[in-house]
Amino acid sequence: MLMTYLKVFLTGGIICLIGQILIIKTKLTSARILVLFMCLGVFLEGIGVYQYVVDFGKAGATVPIIGFGRTLAKGVIKEVSTKGILGIFTGGLTATAAGIAASVIFSFFVALIFKPKTKHS
Amino acid sequence: MNKEERNKRYLAYVSAKSPKTEVWPSLFFAFIIGGLICCFGQAVSDTLANWFPYMTETELGAWTLVVIIFITCILTGVGLFDDIARFAGAGTIVPITGFANSICSSAMEFRREGIIFGMCAKMFTVAGPVIVFGIISSIIIGVVYLFL
């Protein structure tokens, strides 16, 4: 139990640490970091490596945006094997639909309800 | 003053004025906050697995993300997220919180330009590239797997 959470913490922490090192070293903006990590996730799942990271780190590997890319790739791979060519188009978004739809709907209502605070600093 | 020299002086001015991030503390906080967010995700996933034992791992993962995204959007709405993100750096950008926050903060920021052309159109200023590249790369993977 505790061991699991330690692994989750380590995996998630290290992935974020890599992101922070990239930000400091290369001054990449957050949009580029997100795109980079997401593509990395698609690639790693594509070559079949990321499953080992998920087995070790569980949520530590699926909560970062790399996990989002991994879900995209996983969905495509699964749907290609069941639906064939159409699966190429439907697989990715079907698998990640929950995350994208949740982000859109919650953001929509939050933006309607809350007024942005003026940025201090 | 010629153009080259002016550019040089301008760049020096910018780097002097732009906020300095302390390297070691920022690395430390990115690691800690990132790890904690993932632990929270694991806790959500474990709790759901307890409540609904019939759920598959894929469904659990999706639910976990939905819960984290919900909390992120609320925290962004009340303005707390920026306070955390200021010292957490990549610790909040790299987890799915960064994706949700980028949509939510853009939506809030452009709300005053109207609902359709402000909020809805510009919601994806940061998340759009992520989705576009995600779809393109997943299609590439799909094509590769089709011929394997």
Image (tube, coloured by chain):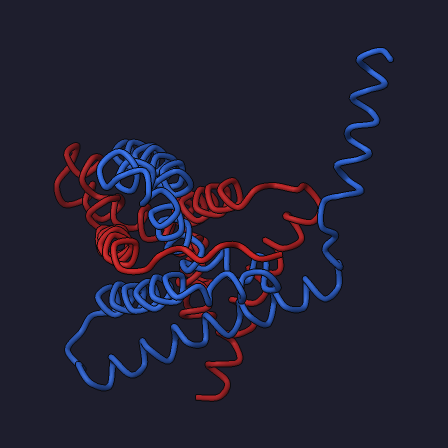
Chain colours: A red, B blue
Query: What's the residue at 33%, 62% (across, down)?
Result: B69
Report the residue that reaches farthest toward the top. Answer: B2
Does residue B60 sit above or below B106 in this rendering? below
Query: What's the residue at 25%, 79% (across, down)?
Result: B48
Front residue of B133/B8: it is B8
Query: What's the residue at 53%, 71% (across, down)?
Result: B35
Res A113 → quadrant: bottom left
Residue A41 falls left or right of residue B29? left
Which quarter shows the N terminus of chain A? bottom left
Q: How many marks?
A: 0
Residue A49: image x %, image y %? 45, 53
Residue B2: image x %, image y %? 85, 11
Residue B79 falls left or right of residue B55? right
Query: What's the residue at 19%, 48% (across, down)?
Result: A94
Residue A66: image x %, image y %? 44, 53
Does residue B140 sit above or below B28 in this rendering? above
Does residue A83 sit above or below A8 in this rendering? above
Residue A111 falls left or right of residue A23? left
Residue A27 falls left or right of residue B43? right
